[in-house]
Amino acid sequence: MNVNPTCNQQRTSDLMVFCTIVTLLIVIGLIFIYSSSSVFALEKFGTSLYFVKKQLMGLLVGLGAFALARYFPLQRIKQYAPIFYILSLLLTALTLLPHFGIRIHGSSRWISLAGFAFQPSELLKITLILYVSFLITKKCHVVSHFWQRFVPITLILALASLVLLQQPDFGLTVTLMVTCVIIFFIAQYQMRYLTWSIAAAVPAVALLIVTSPYRVRRVLTFLNPWSDPQGSGFQIIQSLIAIGSGGAWGSGIAHSKQKFFYLPMQHTDFIFSIIAEEIGFVGSCIIIFAFMALLFFGIRLALKMKDPFCTYATLGFIIMMNIQTLINIAVATGLAPTKGIGLPFVSYGNTSLVGYLIIIGLIVNMTKNSGK
């Protein structure tokens, strides 16, 4: 095979920039996890470094997972994609069992095995994208065949959605569905299939909302948080106060006032609010720009891959991470109802950080080995 040295050099350069952005976001995350959680950690656990230490432990595990994903044979990843999906789906389903699942904030998203608690849905979203990419490339010769190309993937998505909605994890379900629809569009699935799917999904989503009191409450709170400022609207109001009080340049790192027990979940789902308060509009724009650059260079890497499986998987990972980023920032700024989705690489969460590093390891692996 003739390899273009200029193309390889450009791809290596893009990969270096991509990994540098990820590293920068992780460092920013450690800084603001400490800043946002120090008061709460000191009050509850007796040390202001409690959450930072746990995140560093997650980072160490994540680096090991990154190395495993980076050097795992690419052909084996394709071959075992269905098995990986089934195993992660079963692990996620275990969260629904009383003896395994851990219920936090009304959701059973965590599982305890051998004394370790983790969130298996972080693995499910990775394996789902790998499996969908596998099926797309495997059935690419039946582009217009409804039963052979579209139905199997729809069933795979339906199984994952049913398990996630039972937890419930509505935010991740929507994220994965939107990601897969975009992948289908890129893979040139017939528009009538996508139109039928979207037409069926809209009333289903509406039904899920209206039949669940807490989801209805979230939507009403989103529409008018000031209707219950001391109750359901408290969190979003405090988030808006944090963002608004940051001004152009912010109050300074570690000088947030909202972290003093005003803003709940300030180091997880609403860490962007603390970031905006401490480094202001300018600093927030830099964070957003970093995620936009991650999207740009991720797409560039995907489009230069010679293996369609690698292209679809990388695009899926990049799209999913940026949808989660968009949802997190939209929730913090009052532009979307609360979803329970953290800011990738930045919010506190051991399992999520490990999952994102697995994704980065897979992208590096595919970039280096696609086409060999």
Image (spheres, grey):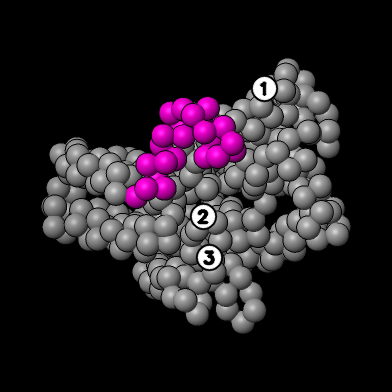
SS for dot 1: helix
Is 254 left or right of 184, judged from the image as shown?
right
**Is 221 one of the magenta-colored residues?**
yes
> Can you tell which quarter of the image residue 112 is in?
bottom right
The overriding secondary structure of the stretch rendered in magenta is helix
Q: Is residue 130 visible?
A: no
Look at the image and give the residue range highlighted in magenta: 212-236
Residue at mark 2 to residue at mark 1: CA–CA distance: 42 Å
Q: What residue does disc 3 label?
A: 103
Q: What residue does disc 1 label?
A: 244
**Residue 62 image position (x, y, % from top left):** 66, 61
Lower position in the chain sequence, tag 1 or tag 3: 3
**Residue 11 image position (x, y, % from top left):** 58, 42
Q: What residue does disc 2 label?
A: 366
Q: Nearer the viewer's eye, disc 2 or disc 1? A: 1
Please, what is the three-letter code of the amino acid marked with disc 1? Gly
For the point 44% across and 40% down, which residue is it? 218
